[in-house]
Amino acid sequence: MRKILVGLSWGWLLVFALIPLLMLFVVSFFHRGVSEFFVVGFTLENYIRLFDPIYFTVFFKSVVLALVTTVFCLLLGYPFAYFMASYGKSARSYLMILVIIPFWTSSLIRTYATMLILRTNGLLNTILLKFGIISEPLEILYTEWAVYIGMVYTLLPFMILPLYSAVEKLDRQYLQAASDLGASPWQTFIRVTLPLTLPGIIAGSLLVFLPALGLFYIPDILGGAKSLVVGSFIKNQFLAARNWPFGAAISVFLCLMMGAGIWLYLWVKKRVSPEEARS
């Protein structure tokens, strides 16, 4: 029975993950077709176009958006995960439910709900005006701030979960030893807690950064599609421009970035150990 279940899992990944990726890789070396999706014939033009300054700007904006989102998620998620791991088991269960609840609803629906909150006559401005905090409605929707809020709200659970796992496994004896040796709470955090939870930080950052590069509906909905990001760019290549080979080349490039990030995580996880952090 175990072999059957494992075989089904591998078969599923082969058919719906590996084969489509291989098809993208092969198509990325083909020519753009006029009436067809692509024309068979080897070329490196699609990858050379990636270094065009126009497309570099799209990648740069997408990377900046993903980095800022990752930083905000880390600043919000690390304290939450740390304090959640410090509570008792019953409190942890309730807090974990709060983290998982957003997954019960489609992220697209939650994005539209965020749009209703951030618009000029939305919930946020209504509350701020009622309490006299502001004198006129804030223009948040269709700005970069709205995009950041939507991205952080959507991806924050992906940062909290690996951080919580890393903090929960932290041996508190190392913290006690650092305190007995005269280390301040800040020194203990920098020299003990942070190195030991670094694999969780990198894992959470990867789980936020990589999806943030590919998400296109949040910038389109909350940002009003004012700035083109790489996710929207790939979508346009496949659906609007009908340039499948170039869209496949961009997708392959993102997959390579994902592979590099996973390698970095494994490398750091292998090097970080309690003995190294203690020294």
Image (cartoon, helix red, strand yellow):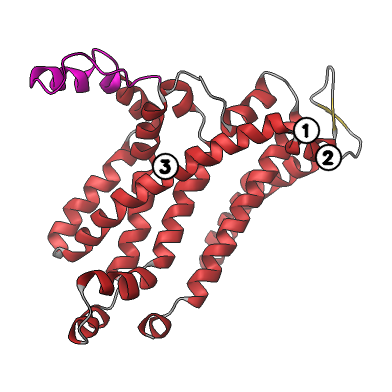
Q: Quadrant of residue 86?
A: bottom left
Outermost residue on the right side: it is: 41
Residue at mark 2: 29
Left or right: 64 as drawn, with respect to 233:
left
Q: Which residue is mark 3?
A: 69
Residue 185 in picture, x, y percent from top left: 21, 71
Compared to residue 158, the image places residue 269 above or below, namely below
| The quarter of the displayed image where residue 192 is located | bottom left
Q: Position of residue 173 (x, y in %)?
A: 23, 83
SS of the residue under disc 1: helix
N-terminal label among 3 and 2: 2
Examine the structure image and report whether residue 2 is included in the region drawn in magenta: no
Residue occupying image coordinates x 23% and y 79%: 183
The residue wearing badge 1 is: 245
Estimate how packed mark 2 is, as few (under 14), some (14 to 19) or many (20 or more) residues with alpha carbons within 10 Å: many
**Given contact means CB atoms under 8 Å apart, are the residues at marks 1 and 2 in contact?**
yes
Rounded to the nearest angstrom, the CA distance separating label 3 from label 1 is 30 Å
| Circle 3: element type | helix
